[in-house]
Amino acid sequence: MKVVGFNGSPRKDGNTGILIHKVFHELEKEGIETELIQLSHKRIHGCIACYKCLENRDQRCVVNDDDANEYIEKMTQAQGVVLGSPVYFMDVTPEMKALIDRVGFVSRSNGGIFRNKIGSLVAVARRTGAVHTLDTMSHFFLSMEMIIVGRAIGVGRDEGDVEKDEEGLMLVNALGQRMAWLLKKLYG
């Protein structure tokens, strides 16, 4: 079994990455392989609504000057997906939004290639916006007909702040445990 995670934060080892790694730690304890993709410093553009993926139905986007097709393939091969984003102006980062739009359109155009995959979500907020950020990512999973095991919020602004958020860490660990449990029930 494999879970691929996407860190939407521009900070590679920032608070969002810390939380995703906490989820991964719980998965790895149960023998589940993990892979983290850092969206910052990668090339992924928003969907241009050309509808070629709907015409071609080859599980690919015709715009091939970025990494979107690599991400589609990784999600197709994995049994689970973790999305993480800090709150940027009350929503996900632009990189995460581009991933959601591109991957989502290809999936919907190809008969729901992510249907019944297991998903979990993490967001980092200083004060507000986490619920909307999680909702954006949740709506993506739900429109892909994925199974969401849960979502967690970490509180922090400066690098490492989430390590002081005891409740957030407890929720993230539980999220990883639930994800591992469900993956083993469905695929084990």
Image (spheres, grey):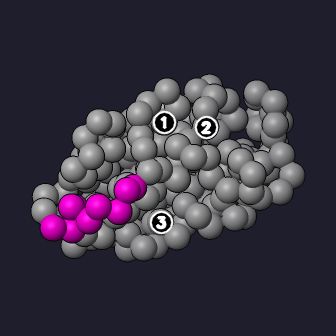
* Neighbourhood count class around disc 1 (C-alpha, 10 Å): few under 14, some 14–19, many 20 upward: many
| Quarter where residue 8 is shown | top right
Say which element carries label 3: helix
Residue 49 drawn at (x, y percent): 35, 62
Q: Which quarter of the figure is the C terminus placed in? A: bottom left
Tell me: residue 44, above or below residue 168.
above
First along the sequence among labels 1 and 3: 1
Tell me: residue 170, above or below residue 145.
above
- What residue does disc 2 label? 9
Judged left or right of residue 127, residue 170 is left
Pointers 1 and 2 in contact (CB under 8 A)? yes
User: Along the line of sight, which residue is nearer the eye, 138 or 106?
Assistant: 106
168 magenta-colored: no
Residue 30 drawn at (x, y percent): 42, 44
Instruction: Identify the mark at residue 39; answer none if there is no mark.
Output: 1
Tell me: residue 22, above or below residue 158.
below
| Residue at x 49% of width, y 27% of height | 41
